[in-house]
Amino acid sequence: MTVDDKTPILVGSGQYVEREATLNPPMHLAAQASAAAIADTGGIDVAAAIDTIAVVKIFSDSARMWACPFGGSDNPPQSVAAAIGANPRHRVYSVTGGNQPQSLVIEMASAIARGEKSMVLLTGAEAIRNQRTAQRNNHEPDWNEHFDEPLEDRGFGEMVATLQEIKNGGIAPIFYYSLMEQARRARLGLSVEDYLRDTAGLLESFSQVAANNPYSQFTGVLSAQAILSAGPLTHLYTRRMIAQDGVNQAASLLLCSVGKARELDIPEDKWVYLHGMAEGAELDMTNRPDISVSPMAAQVVDKALGMAEKSIGDIDLIDIYSCFPCAVTAISDHLGLPADGSTALTLTGGLPYFGGAGNNYSMHALAEVIQQVRLQVGAFALVTTNGGMLSKHASGVFSRQPSTIDWAIADTTVSNESLPRKAICEDPGAGNIVTYSVNYMGDQPVQAMVLAETDVGERFVCCTASDDQATVQAMLDTEPTGRRINVTPPEDQTLHFQLTD
């Protein structure tokens, strides 16, 4: 079929990993992956044709807890440009969120279809292993780079947690996901032991994929038993069930118009078409009526599949974002896919085993899509992504088969305005537990955090006092879901609870 010159396509992908620690900064890794993506196109003078470089926000620029003491580039896209010999007119540094690689594909594909851009490089990297190793060994590399070229720095992005959540135990994503995981366990009616066993079985299949991926940060296969026997982080998570961020990984993609691909002699067998794409934002966790599911994740993936005129049965390759197990099952449950390891739900091996490359993980999944659909000419691939606490979602459907969608006018946004929401209570007094997490430190249970509901149906988050080990242990000894709690009056917006008799 004849394809319009403005049709956006993916034409190159590159990945890079340093398994052993070096003193290289993240943008060095990004440049290596970008050079590989350029070479992968098979085109002529591709670097010179790049008019836009967008870099996914690195972790050290995303939150204080990940700050890097060695400095960094004040213009990450220009760092990459200088290394690969490109001279873009537009440089973008994205907001935070694991959805960003797919969201940037949506944005740049639309700009290409409108004729505003013709060749776009998307890239991202993490050198957290290098950073941590240098700190442990008292090395002080200088990772600072200064450039005068203009940069569109989009900042942190929107908040994905309420102040009450943060003040009452929600200081890291793991605690939110544990609350969501527990809500799913309660909905399924499984014991803690049975739920953990099922989770380990699913994740063993991810580890097997990662072991065969040359770009994995980690080598070897973890058995379900090894995953289960790792030290606990919460009552539903061991250390080997969640994203591992101590990585040195980078991935890059090249998007361009069909016309530009023809101009640069990029062979047609390199072209990958976009068949369906969508994105949307979920409500804050406390506002969600049922946190065991994600209505926005479901609507986003449904919209992407609908645009592609495909059902899940038509999809040959799939990568579901896997920072925590319930991020996988939020999608697999909705699509009716088994979560027992019998169906491949990852192309890379996932964030716990391939590597949790910060906000950029899904750039690796998309890079895998490009390579794998090229080998399977009639195949269709689905990638789902999320950022925050199942907060920001983006999905895409891809194939070598030409697409007729006009991305210049395609509506890819899913609004959350129609989602039902629960009101938040700031001074609850008492309520009933909706879901909970018992959080560990040094293999010892140290705190319980709950999402609860008042008698009038308002929601709130609270936690145990630092010296209240009795309540923490009681939460482990007997099933606390649905139990009544009393809550102390708020002090600096902190709410402490105890179980009633």
Image (cartoon, rainbow, N blue to C red):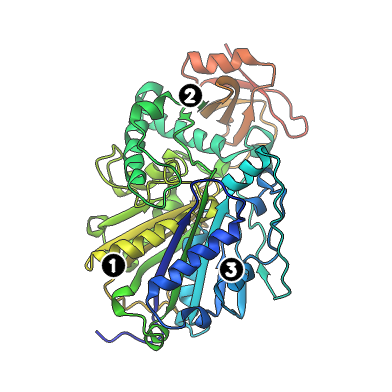
Q: Quick one: label 1, few (<14), some, or many (20+) residues within 10 Å?
A: some
Mark linked to residue 80 = 3
Determine whether label 2 and label 3 are within 8 Å by CB: no
Q: Residue at x 57, y 20 (%)?
A: 445
Q: Position of residue 337 (x, y in %)?
A: 28, 45
Residue 97's place in the image compared with 228, above or below, is below
Measure how far apart labels 3 and 1 are at the Cα level.
Answer: 26 Å
Can residue 144 be seen here? yes
The reply, left or right, for residue 65 in relation to residue 96 is: right
* Amino acid type, mark 3: Val
Q: Secondary structure at mark 3?
A: helix
Q: Quick one: label 3, few (<14), some, or many (20+) residues within 10 Å?
A: many
What residue sits right under mark 2 in the picture? 481
* Amino acid type, mark 1: Arg
Q: Earlier in the sequence, mark 3 or mark 1?
A: 3
**371 or 84, nearer to the observer:** 84
Measure how far apart labels 2 and 3 are at the Cα level.
Answer: 50 Å
Mark linked to residue 374 = 1
